[in-house]
Image (tube, rainbow, N blue to C red):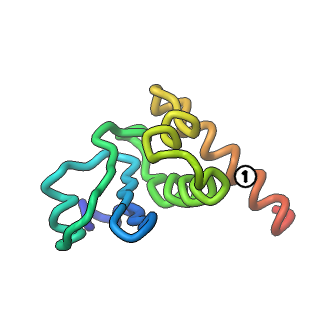
Amino acid sequence: MSTGAGVHWFVVYRRGEEIYEIFDSLGTTADFVRKVLRRKGHCEFNESALQSTKSDNCGEFCVYYIVERFFNYDLSYAELLLSAFHGNPEKNEEEVSNFLEILLESKYGT
């Protein structure tokens, strides 16, 4: 989805046969979800922004979500969002940035 000079990232994760999670760090709407899926099934998504509207770190938020989902498969989508993110987008920015810095440092020694 292009919103200007860059591209916006989001994650579509299929959990089970008929459950889909759409993670969008800027939040999304039911209309957008229907356009993306175009199929039947239960869909869970977040309407609230988790990242700052001044930020262009949506790709980093997607990586963070994927790692959190991998290690917390037993949580519902709502529980995962509550455990992984704060109500404050600026605090989320800091946490995601720190997480990726540690991840990349351990992998690549940067």
Residue 69, x across and y down, in percent: 57, 55
**From what the image shows, is residue 5 above or below residue 56?**
below
**From what the image shows, is residue 49 above or below residue 10?**
above
Residue 8, x across and y down, in percent: 35, 62
**From what the image shows, is residue 79 above or below residue 28?**
above
Residue at the extreme front = 17
Residue at the extreme top = 87
Label 1 CA crowd tier, 10 Å (few <14, some 14–19, many 20+): some
Seen from the viewer's position, the closer of residues 74 and 44 is 74
Q: Is residue 107 left or right of residue 14?
A: right
Residue on which the image places disc 1: 101
Q: Is residue 75 left or right of residue 2?
A: right
Badge 1 amino acid: Glu
Seen from the viewer's position, the closer of residues 5 and 26 is 26
Which of the 4 image quarters holds residue 11? bottom left
Q: Name the residue located 60 percent from the left edge and 45 percent from the top edge.
A: 96
How many discs appear? 1
Residue 51, x across and y down, in percent: 43, 41
Q: Name the residue located 32 percent from the left edge and 49 percent from the top edge.
A: 45
Q: Name the residue located 78 percent from the left edge and 51 percent from the top edge.
A: 102
Which of the 4 image quarters holds residue 20? bottom left
**From what the image shows, is residue 59 above or below residue 27?**
below
Q: Is residue 60 left or right of residue 7?
A: right
Task: Give the structural element (helix, strand or loop) at label 1.
Answer: helix
Residue 29, x across and y down, in percent: 20, 49
Q: Is residue 24 left or right of residue 39?
A: right
Q: Name the residue located 16 percent from the left edge and 62 percent from the top edge.
A: 34
Quadrant location, the C terminus: bottom right
Which of the 4 image quarters holds residue 6? bottom left
Quadrant location, the N terminus: bottom left
